[in-house]
Structure formats: C-alpha cells, structure tokens
Image (spheres, rainbow, N blue to C red):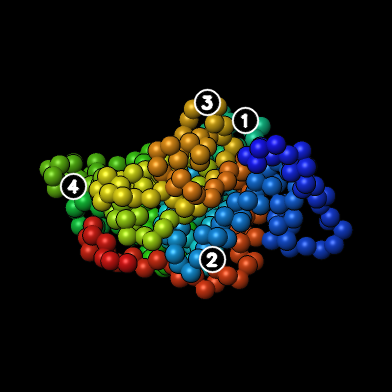
Amino acid sequence: MSKDVPSREDLLKTPIKMLDLSEKTSIGTLVDHFSGTSFQARKLSQCVDIFRKMVDEDGTHTVMLGMSGALIAAGLRKVISDMIKMGLIDVIATTGAVVYQDFYQAMGYDHYKGDSNSDDVLLHKHMIDRIYDTYVDEDKFRETDVNIGHIMDTLEHRKYSTREFLAILGEKCQEDEDSILGAAYNMGVPVYCPAIADSSIGIGLSTAYKRSRESGMGMDEIFHIDTIRDNFEIAQIVHQSKATGAIYLGGGVPKNYINDAIVMADMLYGDQDGHEYAFQVTMDRAEWGGLSGSTLGEAQSWGKIDSEATYAMVHVEMSVAIPLIAGAVMEGRNWRKRSVADFVWEDDKLLPL
C-alpha cells in the first residue's frame, strides 16, 4: 500500500478514551481529558491547546480577540476582563453592543434573570428589554446613551479612532475591577469597534452630534469617529508584530476585521503573513456561505490565516465554551512569563514595537 494512503492499522490505532469523573478534577484537567474524546469536546480541547501556544511563546505572538454576541448578558464580563488583566490579550475588535453593555454595568446598572417565554409586549410597556432569558432596564440604557453623548460634548471636536474614544470610556470604567474597557485601558490594550454606529454607543454619540448641529456648528467642526483611521492603526499593529494569533468569540464584524487586518497590512506594507494561530467559538454553520460560520480553512484562501497555521473551530454556545477555554488556560503557568504588547501612539502613528 502507498505510504500516502493510511493502512487499516493506522486508522484504528488510537482508541477513544472514556471520561473518568470519579475523582476531583480541575477545569484544565477536564478539558485536557476532552482531547481523548470526540465531537465538540475534542474540538474545545484543541482550542485550548492553540490558546496556550499563542500565549506560551514569550510575547512572540500578538493575540487579537474578536468579540460579538451577548457576552455580557451571558455573565462573561469578568472572564474576559480577567483574560485582559492577566496579559493574555493584546488587541481587541468588538461589536459596539459588547463594550456598551460593559460600560452600562460600569455605571452601576445590571442585567437580570428573565424568561425566554416572556410577554414581550408587557416588557416593552415596562421599559424592559429582553436578550433571550435576560432582562435589561431600558430606562438605564437611555441614561447610559445620554451619558456617552455628554462625554463626547466635553471632548475636543476633531477626528477620533474608535481606539481613542473607547480608551476615554475605559478611563471612566477603570475603578470597576470587572470592566472590560477598564481593564483594556489599564493594560494599554487597544479596543477597536469598526461598526460602532450600529450600537447604543452610536445612538449616544448621535445625541451629541444633534446638539452640535443645532448649536450652529458646521459639519467640519463636529467630532467624527474615523473608522478608516482604525484600519490604518490596526494595519500598523499587524505589520510590526513578529506574528499574530486570532481568537474569535462569535463571528460577524469582529471576526472579519481581525482577518481583514492581515489584508490591510499586506496592502499598505506588503509581504504580510496570515495569523499563525487561530480558533473560533461559534454556533454558526459554513453551509450558508456567511462569514460568521465560514471555516478558518476558507480564510486561508484569502491569506488571512497562514497556510501553515494551527487552527480549530468549536461549535458550542459561548456561555458554556468560554469559561472552559479561559479557565483551562488561566490554570497554566507558562503564560505568566508573557508580557502584553506595549503600544505607544503618536496620533495615528504606532511607534516601533
């Protein structure tokens, strides 16, 4: 038989290992044992192994985290902020909803246990918004929107990248030990939100824009959130990094943005390798052709994932998968010698790393 064609013996040489839960175990040990099982448990174990490799390389890889979905409503706020504080994340790309709800909680407001079978018309009458089985206070959301608008009123009227503006919000959150934006601000982790207008942050900024226009300001005098500047900035990060790793929590714009950062760097500076490590937690499927469910192998055809990359996808709901993945990595020790990337900016220019 050709050496390129596996023999029957080769195909049947590795038995599945039955999980043994008869003794006490840690999250890390449990997830490591998943590697001997099947289906999404094995995939989850592969994601953990890739995450460990990303952060065990003594700072070789710039780790980029994409966040989408209802992570705060799912109770994952502190898990993510701890990942940042422990130096496991260097750059973030996020939906506006994730960082908005983080800021909302930093203002002292909460998410509440609800019921997925609620009377939604009644909830609307009570000014309560529903995120599946979780409630939020629409009155407090509106207060938060207005607060964000008034923050912008106090700033110099010029162009801001989303990194700059979210750092301003992060500075106001830094006393909240569980805040994602606060942790990112304290650790110097840039946070990009390329679709910021499509969020309650965008709504809040619209209130400030309206006030500026009604005060007689010309359009060239009003503050602007400049997402093309975001592109220029993140391309510099990728270009100056020795190598990059990507974590996608969900899909959507953040996943695409972290992948497109490779293309941006290649277009602006040339000769850019794709991400060397990558993993995604998703419930989306590849068959429908959408980005959120597209395989990381498909991204190799675009050059966004390196041709020799190590990557994995696990199809598990995030409120279950993320605590297992993060918990298993946090239990380790090798990442503790890692230093978060030190980004120093002069306006939109990244100083050499």
The image quadrant where one finds the N terminus is: top right
- Vertically, is 60 above or below 102? below
Q: Residues within 10 Å of mark 1 (few under 14, many from 20)?
A: few
Q: Which residue is mark 4?
A: 222
Nearest to N terminus: mark 3 or mark 2: 2
Residue labelled with disc 2? 56
Determine crowd level at label 4: few under 14, some 14-19, many 20+ residues with C-alpha closer than 10 A: some
Three-letter code for the amino acid on which mark 3 is drawn: Trp
The one of 195 and 299 positioned closer to us in this rendering: 299
Residue 115: quarter of image: top right
Cβ–Cβ under 8 Å for marks 3 and 2: no
User: From the viewer's perspective, is the residue at label 4 or at label 2 nearer?
Assistant: 2
Residue hosting label 1: 119
Q: CA distance from mark 3 to mark 4?
A: 41 Å
Mark earlier in primary sequence (3, 1): 1
Q: In the rendering, at what x and y percent does residue 195 appear?
A: 36, 41
Nearer the N terminus, badge 4 or badge 2?
2
Q: Residues within 10 Å of mark 2 (few under 14, many from 20)?
A: some
Question: Among all residues in the image, which is located at the extreme right?
Answer: 22
Q: Is residue 151 visible?
A: no
In-image side of 119 versus 351 (left or right): right
Q: Is residue 175 above or below residue 74?
A: below
Residue receiving disc 3: 288
Q: Secondary structure at mark 4?
A: loop
Three-letter amino acid code at the position of disc 2? Asp
Q: CA distance from mark 1 to mark 2?
A: 49 Å
Q: Which secondary structure lies at badge 2?
A: loop
In the image, 234: left or right of 216?
Answer: right
